[in-house]
Amino acid sequence: MSRDSSSWIEKILKKPHIVISILAIFVLAGVVGYGKMDRNLFPNSNYPEVAIVVVELGASAQTIATNVAVPIEKELYTLDEIRRAHSDTIDEMTVIRAEFEYNKDVDAALNDVSSIISKIRAKLPSDIKEPQIIKITKATAPIMVVAMSPKDGSKMSLDDIRDIASGRIKQHLLQSAGVSNVDIFGGNERELQIVIGKNKLDSMHLSPIVKRDIY
């Protein structure tokens, strides 16, 4: 080390307020940088993924795979930066998963998949329920499918089983920690059918169209 550089350092060290000022600048920069720095203790190491859940009551697994899962998978492969599309199908339900490259934003992937489903919705069976589109991340709770049926010899019907599942069981699950949504499908769903006697209405000079004035 030259004499000039040594004398320069010595001059600075002889003025402690300069050293303290420099250290204060570094400390301040570190505090500001730490506050603005993004922190994620559990970074998402999985590929961005979007799942499509489609329910078709009364349909077999083979029927849903042929008429729903395969057409959706073909359309998904037309999207940019998609790695693969695959499905898991059981009776009355299929789950199609679209996996994208790392540089694909999961929200952008969700929008792309939604556009695809809207595009081919008319080509899918008319009796399917509205497809549910879900983005899959580390924070997404796993999906569990539970099948219920009456015991052998039980007098309970599928109507009763669905009523129990839609009532007490669903409410109990929704109140459990970590559960955000519960969907009920399958079984027999009760409905109320009103049959209007046209001849009787005609004899009373009435119309089946009911108008109600709201004040």
Image: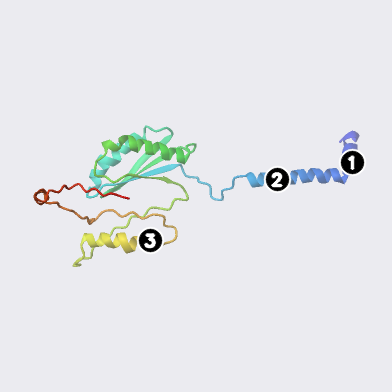
Q: Where residue 111 appears, x then y in whole percent?
A: 42, 38
> Which picture quadrant has residue 178?
bottom left
* In the image, residue 105 above or below residue 184: above
Q: Where residue 165 appears, x then y in whole percent?
A: 30, 60
Dot 2 amino acid type: Gly
Q: Where residue 152 appears, x then y in whole percent?
A: 20, 65
Q: CA distance from mark 2 to mark 3?
A: 46 Å
Q: Check contact, mark 2 vs mark 3: CB within 8 A.
A: no
Q: Residue visible at 50% across and 45% down?
A: 45
Other residues around mark 2 within 10 Å, as few (<14) / some (14–19) / many (≥20): few
Q: Secondary structure at mark 1?
A: helix
Q: Nearer the viewer, residue 86 or 137?
A: 137
Q: Secondary structure at mark 2?
A: helix
Residue under label 2 = 30
Other residues around mark 1 within 10 Å, as few (<14) / some (14–19) / many (≥20): few
Residue under label 3 = 173
Locate the N terminus and report the quarter of the image it occupies.
top right
Circle nearer the N terminus (1, 3): 1
Residue under label 1 = 10
Dot 1 amino acid type: Glu
Q: CA distance from mark 1 to mark 2?
A: 27 Å
Q: CA distance from mark 1 to mark 3?
A: 72 Å
Q: How many marks?
A: 3
